[in-house]
Amino acid sequence: MRKKLTTVGAAVLIATSAVLMTACNDKDVKGTPVTSVSQVPLGGAPTDTKGGSNSQSAVRTIGKTGYYEGFEITVDKATVTPDEFGGAKVRIDITYKNTSTKDKTLNASPGLQIGGALDAGASWDTPTVPGKGSAAGDITTTVKKLDTADHLLDTLTVVYGTSQENQTLIPLKADAKADSVAPKTLNVSGKLVQDQTTVEITGGTLTPSYTKGERNKMDLALHIKLVGGSGISDGGLNVFYDYFSLKTPDGQTAVADIRGPINELLNRGETIDHADNFVVFVVPAPATGSYVLSYDASKGEKTAPTYSFTVS
């Protein structure tokens, strides 16, 4: 009889242990938080942390595009990785598309706002991008306290430029739009002739100025082709950017800026048609209205030819 009682007691003990293990497992599963962003396990089952999150990375697809300094900038995705102290690491993946014809690196460093305040601890990688090419970059930072990945990502905004300049803002919140002005193509074509030099206007663009202190200014750029006449003397003729001026809709006159650094030696019978030969003028935003372009290599000694066009 004593032997049978011992056997029954062991069976009861095993059954009780199984029930306790099942209860503990159920509690762990129910305690796992739910987020609307996708979850990528870092390894093992999810466990609670001090920050109210778990040991999983949260990834949000962003897919928003802004424009800055000749780049088309797309914020692709953001990843939040909780740490063991209740905080998290954040990585934002970005694609930079260079719209110019020359290899280029972003002059201004991108910033990251958290709840409207600039994060001084954020770091970034902005690549050198071939002309008309694309390359990957990123922004990374850490936060000391993580509530939920969704809430954190909703407070983040990628920033290019300061409040004193024309800014580009790309918020990570799903229903918020990028605050950025896309380059505008100008349908312009005309011709200016002075002596043996013919200047052909073959197109143009209008973009916000990203130069320091030029908030509410625009860069109006006109692409030019140069044709040398048969009467050009040996040694050729110089054509510089500051031979061009522009009468703006408000009646002011702007001289072409060095940011369109045209410096060409035009020979007899030669045609110069470089893809990056733009005469650039800084004009007030929104830059709509009627303009008159002038070309004068004679420094006022001869009549300067003009070309009129309208930006709508």
Image: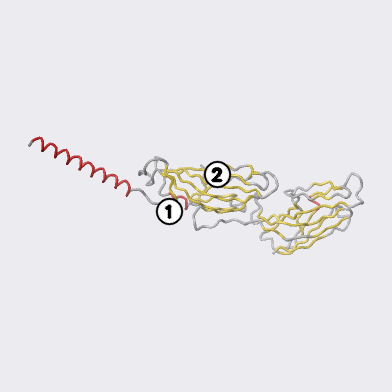
Q: Position of residue 107 (x, y in %)?
A: 64, 45
Q: Which one is in front, 111 or 56?
A: 56
Element under disc 2: strand
Q: Which mark is residue 138?
A: 2
The residue furthest left is: 1
Above-or-below relation of 251 to 2: below
Task: Give the left or right position of residue 303, taking residue 122 as reference.
Answer: right
Q: Position of residue 277 (x, y in %)?
A: 76, 50
Q: Which one is in front, 283 or 154?
A: 154
Q: Which one is in front, 246 or 50?
A: 50
Residue named by callout 1: 36
Q: Position of residue 32 (x, y in %)?
A: 35, 48
Residue neighbourhood size for the residue with mark 2, other residues' Cα within 10 Å, grouped as few (<14), some (14–19), many (≥20): many
- Residue flagged by tag 2: what amino acid is it? Asp
The number of callouts visible is 2
Q: Which quarter of the image is occupied by the C terminus?
A: bottom right
Q: Residue at x 73, y 53 (%)?
A: 280
